[in-house]
Image (cartoon, rainbow, N blue to C red):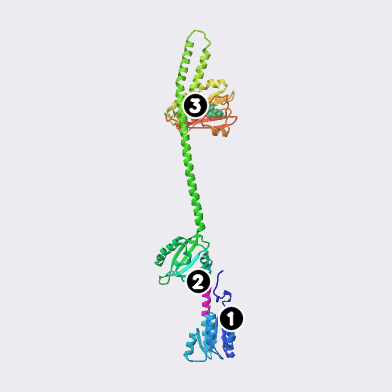
Amino acid sequence: MVKFPDNYVAIDSVDCVRILIVDDEVDISDSLSVILEMHDERYTIKTASGLKQARSLVDEFKPDIALLDIKLGQDSGLDLLSWLKQEFEGVYCIMMTAFRETKYAVTAVKHGADDYLHKPVDAEQLLVAVTRATEIVDLNRQRIQTEKRFRAVFEQTFQWLLLADSNGVLLEANQVALDFRNLESTHVLGAALEDAPWWAGSPVTKEKLNQMLPSVSAGSFMRDEIQIKNSANKMITFDMSIKPINNHDGNIEMMLIECRDISDRKQAEMLVKKAHDDLEFKVAERTEELQAAMLRAETANRAKSDFLSRMSHELRTPMNAILGFSQLIQLQLEASSVKTDIKPDIDEIVMAGEHLLALINEVLDLAKIEGGNLKVDLEPVELECLMDECLVMIAPLAVSKNIEVVNYLSNADYTVIANHLRLKQVMINLLSNSVKYNKENGSVTVSSVVTDSKIKIIVKDTGIGLRPEQIEKLFRPFERVHDDPAIEGTGIGLVISKTLTNLMDGEIGVCSVYGQGSEFWIVLNLSAK
Ligand code: ADP
């Protein structure tokens, strides 16, 4: 609640000026009354003929201006003057007397009179005196109104406001500040700021104040975070600022102290910081776990690649021996005139051996890829030638499934930047897949599209095709997406093809419609002729 001074006048009654005339000669009071009423319609006038009547009237009437006769029958107008000045701060008193000597005027002023008129009162002099009094009454009211506005701001703000003089002696403290420690203004006003009761129990704050005040006295604006115990003994964090206020000469006249409760903000900041620290800790912990897991996975993978590589090498030597000797027997049988029925068995051994050797080579390639040891030398490679070699190799398989192979590259004179052996390996993988995953009596078409310095070689089949989710799994080791045991394979051909194509600066891809067929393609750089 904002408290206003007792003599505060509400704005709607500002226009009205209440004048009390006290004279034991009623005729005089009446005539003065008439003169004033005619002069200004703002004047509301009441008259009294004696001290007693005047006293009983003023309580309710609350005069702004009083015209008092010095002599009120047996009573003295000076007594009334003293009483009025004491009881109604701000009332403007004009004394009237028939005595001409100056000493009466002096006595009246000593009793608190604001002005003095000789009797009989001249109308003009009366109006001059009352008009002057009215101006002072108006100024007073404006001052009160302005003060009321500033006090409203002072008291209604949510933050503490303290006002101290240049020596740090407290002049004002708003209610918010007083309520914080259940204080009365009498407890703090007149006290030195650094000794005020708020900082009792907060020695650090007192210390800070002692450091800040000399700087403020020297003209600096100071600001700091402080902690103060409230009436429930809880420490509250405030943002405190002390501003010097200068007078007209530029000297420091007062200090304005503002304190804003920032404990909620501090709490929130603390929670955010804690959450941040927790998160950082968790991220660090998780990163460490992941690094350890990655290290374990890498070690395991390297061990697997080493094993595959060693096994393949170990298998290749005896495999080559088996193949070599069986091919030797094949040749001897062909050259001999002796009739024997073991030839088909030897052919089977050679075929199975070649198949096994191809598998071992693939596994060895995969081990090299995973170990990052596969190197490919690039050279110009004539496509037509290479394709012919590949088609010869897959022809028996195509014939066995009655699949027609159409090669649109047969007369194309293109040379690509690749590695003959490795490109052949890729093309054989794509071509053999297009036959393996084809339907009986289907077809395989090899075509190309040339753009700028690149060529796209497309192997299209009319086979079982691939679903989108199956396409996503392609090019991963051992991923056989059809899972049909009737079709031979290991699921590593496409992985090797992709790595080899990339090593030849090319790209590999697929598009397919399930049930209708697939198109596998590779893009390679053309060689400048
Ligand atoms: P493999 O043929 O030895 O299983 P690949 O790596 O060559 O291994 O192929 C991986 C998988 O991709 C095959 O198992 C098959 O499911 C699928 N695939 C490859 N080519 C085709 C194709 N032309 N049509 C349909 N599916 C194919």
For image coordinates 48% across by 9% down, the residue present is 336
For marks 1 and 3, give the one nearer the viewer. 1
Residue position marked by numbered label 2 in the rendering: 186
Residue 414 visible in the snapshot? no
| Secondary structure type for disc 1 | helix
Pointers 2 and 1 in contact (C-beta within 8 Å): no
Pointers 2 and 3 in contact (C-beta within 8 Å): no
Q: Splitting the image into 4 quarters, where does residue 193 fall? A: bottom left
> Residue flagged by tag 2: what amino acid is it?
Thr
Q: Quadrant of the C terminus?
A: top left
Vertical relation: 31 (above or below) 328:
below
Q: Splitting the image into 4 quarters, where does residue 314 fall? A: top left
> Residue flagged by tag 3: what amino acid is it?
Met
Q: Splitting the image into 4 quarters, where does residue 74 fall? A: bottom right
Marks 1 and 3, how far apart at CA: 118 Å
Marks 2 and 1, how far apart at CA: 29 Å
Q: Which circle marks residue 278 in the picture?
A: none
Residue position marked by numbered label 1 in the rendering: 59
| Secondary structure type for disc 2 | helix
Q: Depth check: give the residue in front, 95 or 194.
A: 194
For marks 2 and 3, give the one nearer the viewer. 2
Q: Is residue 463 magenta?
A: no
Residue position marked by numbered label 3 in the rendering: 427
Report the magenta stretch's main SS. Answer: helix
Percent x, y of residue 133: 52, 82
| 10 Å crowding of disc 1: few (<14), some (14-19), many (20+) | few
| 10 Å crowding of disc 2: few (<14), some (14-19), many (20+) | few
Vertical relation: 47 (above or below) 478:
below
Residues in magenta, as a range = 136-147
Q: Is residue 144 magenta?
A: yes
| Secondary structure type for disc 3 | helix
For marks 2 and 1, give the one nearer the viewer. 2
